[in-house]
Amino acid sequence: MEENFLLIKQISEIKELISVALMGKRDFIPFEITYKISNLLLSSNNKEILEFHYDLIKNEANKELYYDLRSSFMDRPIVEVEEFLLKKYSTETNITTKADIIQILGTLGSSKISPIAKVNINSEIRDIRYRCIIVLGWVGNKKDLPILNERLVNEPDDELRGYAATAMREIWFKKRAASENILPYLYSALVKENSEETLSMIITVIQDLLKRRFGLQERINEGIITGDPLKAKEKIIQKLGLK
């Protein structure tokens, strides 16, 4: 009885804070408010709180709050939320929420999200393809490189082709594949690629794997790549004798 009372009080307090956060349709929500909301949500992993938190991340009325609430779900222990989210994925109809589930479980390192990512990496929905590509980089291994290469070669979106390359680098970072397993895919894609955006991403990955610079500089935290990708492409082709 007391536990139910505390739960009702906790949820009521969170709702009140959210009302304050959204007051006046403000563009910026004070950190202390989002901090309090996250702390209250993360203070428990019982089913009622998980359901309540899950319903909150389905509301995109305020983007800043939405991203904060989604981020705080990623701070929950995987043992507490993995099965909960997998069950939600099987019944969820909202595409953005399904994509969020893929990303949350990928961020938490769930091996169980890998099969879902592989099945949906060719989805007609760009956001689903995007989340599956990055998640496969987080949880994938050497055996998944051909799947990412298929996106590197056949993905119609320039940016997502680039993300397929950076997902391969993530697998290399996690020591789940060696550079020699990845570089042939990148070389082949580089020769055929014409999009400067995609080339920039492929080339920065090649530079990291070879520990050599070909004219591009990546500021990962800012999401910025500087330099001329077309010149860098020609330099790589000449120096490495690619065809």
Image: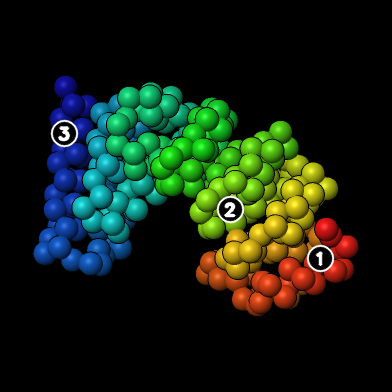
The C terminus - image quarter? bottom right
Cα–Cα span, label 3 and label 1: 64 Å
Would you name the residue on which mark 1 appears?
Answer: 237
Q: Residue at image x 14%, y 41%?
A: 12
Would you name the residue on which mark 2 appears?
Answer: 161
Q: Is residue 170 visible?
A: no
Mark 1 residue type: Ile
Vertical comparison of 182 with 27: above or below: above
Label 3 Cα neighbours within 10 Å, binned few <14 / some 14-19 / many ≥20: some
Q: Earlier in the sequence, mark 3 or mark 2?
A: 3
Q: Is residue 83 visible?
A: yes
In front: mark 3 or mark 1?
1
Mark 3 residue type: Ile
Mark 2 residue type: Arg
Question: Where residue 80 is drawn, which disc sits there?
Answer: none
Q: At numbered mark 3, what does the secondary structure look like: helix, strand or loop?
A: helix
Q: Residue at image x 71%, y 33%?
A: 143
Of residue 18 and residue 163, the one placed in the foreground of this image is 163
